[in-house]
Amino acid sequence: MLTVRARKERFPVLGFVVFISVVLLLVAGIHLYLWQRLVRDTTTAGGRARRVGSWAAFALAVSVPALLIGGRSGIGWLAWGYVWIAVMFYLLVALVVLELPMALARWQLRKRSAGAATSASASASASDHDPERRLLLARGAAIVAGLTATGVTAYGLRSALGPPRIARAQVPIGKLPRGMDGFRIATVSDIHLGPLAGRAHTERIVAMINQLDADVVAIVGDLVDGSVGELGPAAAPLGNLRSRHGAYFVTGNHEYFSGAQQWIDELPRLGIRVLANQRQAINGLDLAGVHDVAGETEGMGPDFDAALGDRDPARPVVLLAHQPIQASEAASRGVDLQLSGHTHGGQMAPFNLLVKLQQPVVSGLGEVDGMPLFVTNGAGFWGPPVRVGAPPEIALVQLRSA
């Protein structure tokens, strides 16, 4: 019989193996489908084009798990291969959308051939032309899908690597003192410093935040994808952040992939206070922050009692929590506003539709159990350096006394 400790050690490993197996099967299935539509259906059997296309499809399929491993280890040139994942995804979407019109076109070809087969010679002629027509049809669909996927990916690259937009929101809070009406919180999340987003990325974000002349800067998680040793120089410009009442940070799930405690120790050296299940009084407002739920595996999960307990309920409280899904707990404890990130706004449409299945708000200002919840798209990206339908942003949230 397994001991409790053995079970804890075994099940995370088992879960990881299952996860990797599912990912590999999914990647293999997608590439098999792409091979069928882009290689097999558009080339002749035994030809050189089919051999070259088949080897290319195999190499690209193998590259995806290699990217997920090597790209995470800081190899910049390898991480750029994530662009293929975006192209792969939009090829899949385009081809699936084309399946119905392609099926109708093939049905029309068969119907036309059957109608033309009024004699033995006509039937032979139709039979001769059918493979050519099907090949032409498949090549046309492949060209449309290829142009669509590369066009959308190119647009997404430009969006993801360009400067973040400034998103603005006003949130009325009944308990906010009139003297704090217009209090401004510059909110940024999901900066994702890593192989493809380095010091220049941080410097641009810091310069844009400083131009907002905010009262507080809130960094709501997923700042890094790497250790302090790897990304310390890239994060250093955060020390230049300016606001009237300081800059604050809460952990996101990616901090726990990177060594959360080392960043909790590092950020105060840059002048950023980490709200580790804590709160800070700022004039007539309480600013609180909780760890991300991913920290539970390391004994560093969210503790709402520590962050919100024993406070004066007459004072308004704004909570920083990386994931919007934490809003239900916050609302039950009388929080007046939660600021979150994590979703990336979906990053690559139509992923935003899937995010809605897990998170109560994907982007912008919403409400959970009567509590306002603002979710920012984030200023960076994860995986493919591509954003479609969810541009990077820095949010300026202004509190208004109702």
Image (spheres, helix red, strand yellow):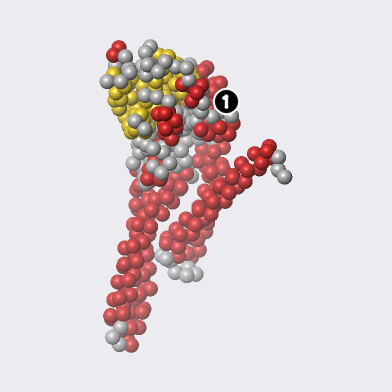
The N terminus sits in image quarter = top right
* Residue at 54% across, 25% down: 263
Query: Which residue lies most toward the bottom here?
Result: 120
Q: x, y percentage for residue 126? A: 33, 79
* Residue at 56% across, 37% down: 73
Q: x, y percentage for residue 62? A: 54, 52
Q: Quadrant of residue 287?
A: top left
Q: Quadrant of residue 214?
A: top left
Query: Which residue lies most toward the right here?
Result: 1
For this rendering, which residue is in front, 390 or 277?
A: 277
Give, as a three-letter code, the residue at label 1: Gln
* Residue at 37% across, 45% down: 353
For this rendering, which residue is in front, 130 or 49?
A: 130
The C terminus sits in image quarter = top left
Residue 189 seen from this side: no
Q: Quadrant of residue 324?
A: top left
